[in-house]
Image (cartoon, rainbow, N blue to C red):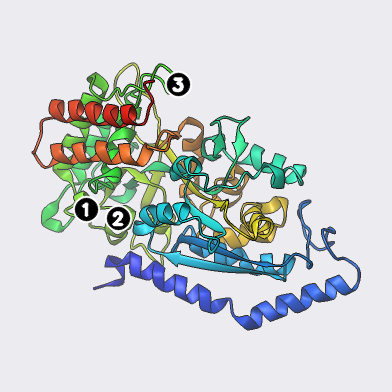
């Protein structure tokens, strides 16, 4: 199996290499340097003269061990390991133990960790869409008392990070902060501009009808070239593809997300149009599509067998020559919109972040660690440099602006964030509902159900869960 065909193993190998790179010898050097600073009276929380950010301070008196569980490889584990030496420079007596596991297993594992009430975990770095379920079982520590101690940092974080990926209860700017989202993402429009130009197409599709034309024009299975791919694995992955297309036609999950509402609204003209359009795109699908998560999609796009992905989660992998055969030919833009009067570019927005476990015995140290991860240039420009160098994909707008020249897909993220909608409603049942929706989408793709029957089943299944959960009084 070639390196192009096994992106997951490549990222796991990089994960292992990063662990080895941050050696005990490096840590000893950092600790020695910080100890020298302490002996000349710099001590705890005194600004350092040789750093750029106003938020820089050190604390050699704080002690403890912080254990963080995170998805392995690019975007999540590796950036954390990349900024770890700087954290040890600031907090030499706090040990950070990064426990990484396969991303595909993290949803299930995260729920298990969050509900275990174990003090063995201090920080969980996972999808912010899961956090309402974690909050519902009191697994998350209120971060307001910690953040309020450094109002300058808190103000900078709030201004620089989209509110769409800040987890607060209630879910608005005035809600209580329970997690920091350092990883921002959106569904993007990936396309092979070289192949489009060769086919006489010189405009990025704006609508789904135009996207269908591109998919058909680029589809050539005899040459192992497929005109469409997306993350359509049965369950939540397929559900989010459908929701992204429904959003682009002006659709919603519910009549309203408030008391007296919560009634599902999939079975209507917008739902039908979205699922019909997805079925048309599926005529040009890559063979792996129905079993694809991000890893499978990115591998197929990187090796050139898939050439068009108009609704795919953002990633730096496709424009990285270490992973992609076509790093200079893959462009990014906003996902297409529908063709109706209510249609708009409404990409799904998501992100991963960290919260402090309510059962941690090292909460203050855990806060300092996740705060450091989410600081960027406000604390030290070396933090943002290391974060990007080690494949991070920030939610901070300032970092997207700063590194757009070396991470081209950041331009797509910047265009997407202002018009994006959450990839799930921020309620504890969101992932269960996503599975219900996705299973019905798969039933249409595989010919088990008609579009009408699947949409009716979506509404019925979602309504049943909402009723059982007490949303209807």
Q: Secondary structure at mark 2?
A: helix
For the N terminus, give its image quadrant.
bottom left
Relative placement, left or right, of 166 versus 223 is: right
Residue 303 higher or lower than 273, as above or below:
below
Q: Earlier in the sequence, mark 1 or mark 2?
A: 1
Q: Earlier in the sequence, mark 2 or mark 3?
A: 3
Q: Secondary structure at mark 1?
A: helix
Choose mark 1 or mark 3, whichever is in front: 3
Choose mark 2 or mark 3, whichever is in front: 3
Tell which of 272 and 135 is nearer to you: 135
Mark yes or no: residue 185 visible.
no
Residue at 39%, 42% in the rendered image = 188
Task: Name the quadrant containing residue 211.
Answer: top left
Residue 461 higher or lower than 152, as above or below:
above
Relative placement, left or right, of 33 versus 16 is: right
Q: Which mark, residue 301?
A: 2
Which residue, given by chain and number where applicable, does mark 3 sit on?
258
Relative placement, left or right, of 1 versus 70 is: left
**Crowd around label 2: few <14 · some 14–19 · many ≥20 (10 Å):** many
Q: Tell me residue 192's x, y (percent).
A: 31, 49
The alpha-carbon separation of the residues under discs 1 and 2 comes to 15 Å
Q: Which mark, residue 291?
A: 1
The alpha-carbon separation of the residues under discs 1 and 3 comes to 35 Å
Residue 97 higher or lower than 169, as above or below:
below
Mark yes or no: residue 37 visible.
yes
Choose mark 1 or mark 2, whichever is in front: 1
Residue 34 higher or lower than 134, as above or below:
below
Q: Which mark, residue 215?
A: none
Q: Earlier in the sequence, mark 1 or mark 3?
A: 3
**Crowd around label 3: few <14 · some 14–19 · many ≥20 (10 Å):** few
Residue at 33%, 24% in the rendered image = 251
């Amino acid at each position: 199996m070639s390196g192009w065909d096994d992106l997951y193993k490549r990222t796991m190998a990089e994960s292992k290499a990063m662990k080895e790179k941050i050696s005990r010898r490096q840590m000893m050097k950092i600790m020695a340097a910080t100890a020298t600073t302490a002996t000349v009276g710099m001590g705890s929380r005194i600004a350092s003269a040789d750093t750029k950010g106003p938020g820089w301070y050190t604390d050699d008196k704080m002690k403890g061990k912080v254990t963080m569980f995170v998805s392995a490889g690019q975007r999540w584990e590796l950036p954390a390991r990349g900024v770890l030496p700087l954290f040890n420079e600031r907090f030499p007596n706090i040990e950070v133990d990064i426990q990484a596991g396969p991303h595909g297993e993290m949803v299930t594992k995260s729920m298990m960790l969050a509900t275990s009430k174990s003090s063995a975990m201090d920080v969980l770095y996972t999808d912010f869409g899961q956090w309402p379920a974690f909050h519902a079982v009191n697994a998350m520590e209120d971060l307001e008392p910690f953040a309020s101690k450094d109002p300058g940092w808190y103000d900078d974080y709030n201004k620089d990070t989209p509110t769409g990926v800040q987890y607060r209860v209630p879910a608005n700017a005035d809600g209580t902060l329970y997690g920091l989202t350092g990883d921002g993402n959106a569904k993007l429009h990936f396309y092979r501009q070289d192949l489009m130009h060769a086919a006489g197409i010189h405009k990025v599709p704006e609508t789904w009808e135009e996207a269908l034309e591109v998919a058909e024009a680029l589809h050539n299975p005899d040459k192992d070239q497929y005109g469409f791919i997306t993350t359509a694995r049965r369950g939540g992955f397929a559900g989010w593809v459908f929701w992204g297309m429904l959003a682009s036609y002006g659709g919603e999950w519910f009549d309203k997300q408030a008391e007296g509402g919560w009634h599902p609204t999939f079975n209507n003209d917008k739902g039908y149009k979205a699922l019909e359009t997805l079925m048309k795109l599926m005529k040009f699908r890559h063979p792996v599509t129905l079993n694809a998560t991000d890893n499978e999609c990115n591998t197929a796009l990187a090796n050139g067998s898939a050439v068009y992905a108009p609704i795919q989660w953002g990633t730096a992998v496709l424009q990285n020559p270490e992973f992609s055969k076509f790093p200079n030919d893959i462009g990014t833009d906003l996902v297409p919109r529908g063709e109706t009067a209510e249609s708009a570019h409404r990409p799904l927005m998501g992100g991963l972040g960290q919260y402090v476990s309510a059962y941690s015995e090292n909460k203050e140290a855990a806060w300092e660690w996740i705060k450091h991860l989410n600081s960027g240039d406000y604390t030290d420009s070396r933090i943002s440099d290391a974060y990007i160098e080690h494949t991070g994909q920030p939610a901070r707008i300032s970092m997207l602006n700063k590194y757009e020249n070396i991470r081209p897909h950041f331009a797509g993220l910047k265009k997407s964030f202002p018009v994006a909608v959450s990839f799930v409603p921020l309620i504890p049942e969101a992932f269960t509902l996503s599975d219900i929706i996705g299973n019905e989408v798969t039933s249409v793709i595989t010919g088990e159900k008609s579009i009408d029957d699947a949409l009716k089943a979506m509404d019925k299944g979602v309504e049943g869960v909402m009723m059982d959960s007490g949303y209807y009084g």
